Image: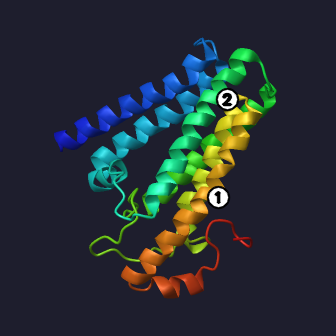
């Protein structure tokens, strides 16, 4: 077992749990925030399980998913905007609960939870199909075009999954204000995809042909 990788994964998991919890529950002023508790549970319990599976079955993919250092300069603005979106979305959700601004009904929270779990399952399937799925934009050694499964439907199924995943977060948290903030994500991701496809076309054999075969980026019959 790669104990260095294991330690890195545990540290990042704990830091993520602490930071996300702080961003939600400190503004909320309480831990008795059902939406916050449900979100932390549905996010970090599956994350822990997926991490364990990758640790034992595909540690190289786990290493790639833990490495967030982008090599492309164009992605710096994407990372910055994403960070602003998450921080402001979580903090506003906490304040929204604390002061009772615009609280969504419980049935919306249930729908959001179901959507989050389904999109997480889709995300896991993408990880299973594509072992080259780094968090950074790059062409890896011996990388091949994946054109089966979800990749036979859209070219970037990971982003399809994360759009549903992230837009369901404010529904779980019960905040329409946070939902408006999280609407930034589809816009941010279009910028990332444009740069990613340029890198893949320039460095990955067969990607141009794949684009001709699979027409849609993230939404079948739309875009």
Camera-near label (1 vs 2) is 1
Q: Residue at x 45, y 28 (%)?
A: 19
The quadrant the C terminus occupies is bottom right
Q: Residue at x 50, y 74 (%)?
A: 197
Coordinates of residue 192 in the picture (x, y in percent): 52, 63
Coordinates of residue 201 in the picture (x, y in percent): 45, 81
Task: Identify the image's colour scheme: rainbow, by chain, secondary structure or one colour.
Answer: rainbow
Above-or-below relation of 58 to 4? below
Disc with the residue nearer the chain's start (1 vs 2): 2
Q: Secondary structure at mark 1?
A: helix
Q: Which residue is mark 1?
A: 187
- The crowding category of the residue bearing disc 1, from other C-alpha atoms within 10 Å (few below 14, some 14 to 19, many at least 20), is few
Above-or-below relation of 15 to 201? above
Does residue 40 appear in this view? yes
Q: Residue at x 65, y 50 (%)?
A: 184
- Measure the C-alpha gap from mark 1 to mark 2: 22 Å
Q: Secondary structure at mark 2?
A: helix
Given residues 41 and 200, the one toward you in this image is: 200
Given residues 71 and 119, the one toward you in this image is: 71
Coordinates of residue 218 in the picture (x, y in percent): 63, 66
Given residues 82 and 204, the one toward you in this image is: 82
Question: Of the numbered discs in the image, which one, if any, rests on residue 95?
Answer: none
Coordinates of residue 146 in the picture (x, y in percent): 45, 73
Does residue 156 appear in this view? no
| Residue 8 quadrant | top left
Q: Which residue is mark 2?
A: 173
Q: Residue 163 vs residue 147: left or right?
A: right
Q: Residue 67 vs residue 206: left or right?
A: left
């Amino acid at each position: 077992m790669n104990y260095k990788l294991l330690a890195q994964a545990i540290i990042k998991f704990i830091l993520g749990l602490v930071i996300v919890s702080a961003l939600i529950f400190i503004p909320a002023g309480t831990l008795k925030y059902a939406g916050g508790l449900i979100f932390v549970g549905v996010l970090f319990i599956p994350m822990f399980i997926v991490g364990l599976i990758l640790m034992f079955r595909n540690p190289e993919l786990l290493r790639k998913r833990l490495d967030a250092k982008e090599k492309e300069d164009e992605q710096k603005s994407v990372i910055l905007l994403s960070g602003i979106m998450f921080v402001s979305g979580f903090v506003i959700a906490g304040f929204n609960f604390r002061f009772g601004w615009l609280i969504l009904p419980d049935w919306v929270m249930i729908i959001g939870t179901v959507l989050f779990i389904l999109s997480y399952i889709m995300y896991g399937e993408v990880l299973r199909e594509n072992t080259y799925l780094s968090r950074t934009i790059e062409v890896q050694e011996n990388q091949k075009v994946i054109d089966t499964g979800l990749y036979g439907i859209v070219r970037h199924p990971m982003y399809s999954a994360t759009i549903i995943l992230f837009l369901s977060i404010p529904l779980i948290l019960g905040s329409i204000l946070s939902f408006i903030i999280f609407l930034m994500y589809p816009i941010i991701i279009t910028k990332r995809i444009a740069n990613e496809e340029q890198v893949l076309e320039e460095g990955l054999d067969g990607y141009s042909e794949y684009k001709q075969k699979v027409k849609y980026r993230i939404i079948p019959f739309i875009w």
